[in-house]
């Protein structure tokens, strides 16, 4: 496996964000986040704070520590829950809720992705907790929103992909709807929630007040339709499946080569001219079928066939050299193993080393953002369930006797 680049390696003996764990970064030093999330969208949000140096406390149940989405030792859990501390609390017990509320008074941020209504029943909703902590930023991620006609539905990434329109424009024409290969609704909802929290923290610096930040898988998915949504809202166009062809930039898509396939992106008249010259087909520039973007759209299939007659004569590597030299965007199509063998991915340090408590020496995916003064790195592996319970409870005033009593009651 590719190792991270030198510029992504950092001294593990960083200053700590909480006095107990090494800090992943100094960017969010002093921010405390309580993590009530499970599965993916919520942990994706919280990972942004953990990786940038906040004191993230993962709240877990002391009874059943199984995680929806896989075991603690699994790659998914390991990648989502690094750089955190763990506190086990039974939120169904009076003593557990009391301890959580006491901890919430010290928090800057709480993130949850319960179904709407659960937090209210537990007595840990925004209205309740902000009464004692007016500066609290409370983020909620749901499937479809906190209210409205579909708010009570259980949310799942593929459901949001379908309801949010993505599956209708993904895949080959006529072959039926197709999901994308990553949980994009989950991931984007988590990232939008993190963005919302950071916006709220910035606003709090002026007003001194926190607020309730809400997003959902459905909102994230609809927003991510981007230009396809704008085409409908402004022009009434309902986009269809186009396979690997770009719906508006032509010719852009996947083309066969002598040894495989490549991506080609010929956007705009200037790049079209460069491309035609590079493949020695200047005649295309005078051909009425291909002379303008509109004409190329009307004759996409004919043009694509003529292009592929040429691209199959050379290898992918040869075309990448020829076309990049001509200023035409082109690239190989990698599997995941090839991605992490790519020299640029290696240079950017996207595979970062960590010593997992369950798996030993391994690598996880690092942050895709480089910072000149406060970089992020993976400072600690995912915690064991309740690994930091005693330390955290002592930080908010519990004595050894209190902690022993709470354990006996099943509250922690």
Image (cartoon, rainbow, N blue to C red):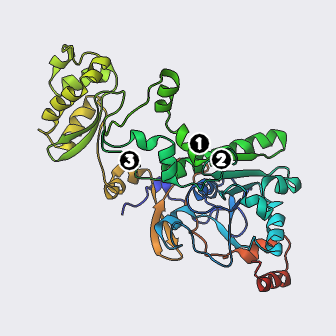
Identified at 83% across, 60% down, the residue is 105
Q: Earlier in the sequence, mark 1 or mark 2?
A: 2
Q: Is residue 179 left or right of residue 130?
A: left
Under circle 3, the secondary element is: loop
Location of the N terminus (image quadrant): bottom left
Mark 3 to mark 2: distance in Å?
24 Å
Could you tell me which quadrant the C terminus lies in? Answer: bottom right
Q: Position of residue 129 (x, y in %)?
A: 83, 57
Q: Nearer the viewer, residue 181 or 22?
A: 181
- Could you tell me residue 155's position as x and y percent? 57, 54
Q: Which residue is mark 1?
A: 219
Mark 3–mark 1 Cα distance, whole angstroms, equals: 20 Å
Q: Nearer the viewer, residue 136 or 24?
A: 136
**Counting other residues with Cα less than 10 Å from the Cα at mark 1, is it few (<14), some (14-19), or many (20 or more)?**
many
Q: Determine which residue is flagged by label 2.
A: 145
Q: Kindly identify which numbered label has been placed on residue 178.
A: 3
Q: Nearer the viewer, residue 334 or 4?
A: 334
Q: Identify which residue is drawn at 47% across, 46% down.
A: 162
Q: Are marks 1 and 2 in contact (CB under 8 Å)?
A: yes
Residue 336 seen anywhere in this rendered image of the structure: yes
The earlier-in-sequence mark between 3 and 2 is 2
Q: CA distance from mark 1 to mark 2?
A: 8 Å
Q: Is residue 27 visible?
A: no
Secondary structure under tag 1 reads helix
Mark 3 burial class by Cα count in 10 Å: few <14, some 14-19, many 20+: some
Q: Quadrant of residue 26?
A: bottom right
Residue 379: name its quadrant. bottom right
Residue drawn 33% across the image and 52% down it: 342
The x, y position of residue 8, in whole percent, is 49, 55
Q: Is residue 403 above or below residue 7?
A: below
Q: Indicate which disc, 3 or 1, sits on the residue closer to the N terminus.
A: 3
């Amino acid at each position: 496996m590719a190792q991270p680049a030198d510029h992504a390696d950092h001294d593990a003996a960083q200053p700590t964000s909480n006095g107990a764990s090494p800090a992943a970064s100094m960017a969010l030093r002093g921010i405390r986040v309580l993590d009530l999330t499970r599965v993916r969208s919520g942990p994706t949000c919280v990972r942004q704070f953990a990786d940038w140096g906040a004191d993230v406390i993962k709240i877990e149940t002391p009874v059943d520590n199984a995680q929806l989405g896989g075991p603690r030792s699994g790659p998914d859990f390991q990648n989502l829950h690094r750089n955190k501390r763990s506190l086990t609390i039974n939120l169904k017990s009076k003593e557990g809720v009391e301890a959580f509320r006491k901890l919430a008074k010290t928090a800057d941020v709480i993130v949850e992705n319960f179904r709407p209504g659960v937090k209210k029943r537990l007595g840990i909703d925004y209205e309740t907790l902000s009464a004692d902590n007016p500066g609290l930023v409370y983020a909620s991620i749901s499937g479809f929103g906190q209210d409205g006609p579909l708010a009570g539905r259980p949310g799942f990434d593929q459901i949001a992909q379908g309801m949010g329109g993505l599956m209708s424009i993904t895949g080959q024409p006529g072959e039926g709807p197709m999901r994308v290969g990553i949980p994009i609704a989950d991931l984007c909802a988590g990232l939008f929630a993190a963005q919302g929290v950071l916006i709220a923290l910035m606003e709090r610096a002026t007003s001194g007040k926190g607020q309730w930040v809400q997003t959902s898988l459905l909102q994230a998915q609809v927003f991510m339709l981007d230009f396809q949504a704008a085409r409908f809202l402004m022009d009434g166009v309902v986009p269809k499946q186009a396979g690997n062809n770009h719906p508006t930039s032509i010719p852009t898509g996947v083309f066969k080569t002598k040894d495989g396939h490549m991506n080609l992106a010929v956007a705009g008249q200037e790049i079209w001219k460069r491309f035609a010259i590079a493949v020695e087909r200047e005649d295309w520039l005078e051909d009425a079928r291909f002379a303008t973007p509109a004409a190329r759209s009307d004759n996409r299939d004919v043009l694509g066939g003529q292009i592929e007659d040429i691209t199959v004569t050379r290898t992918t590597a040869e075309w990448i050299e020829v076309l990049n030299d001509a200023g035409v965007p082109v690239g190989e199509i990698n599997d995941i193993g090839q991605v992490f063998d790519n020299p640029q991915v290696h240079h950017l340090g996207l595979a970062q080393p960590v010593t997992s408590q369950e798996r030993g020496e391994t690598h996880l995916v690092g942050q895709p953002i480089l910072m000149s003064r406060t970089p992020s790195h993976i400072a600690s592996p995912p915690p064991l369930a309740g690994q930091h319970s005693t330390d955290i409870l002592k930080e908010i005033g519990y004595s050894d006797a209190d902690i022993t009593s709470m354990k006996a009651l099943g509250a922690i």
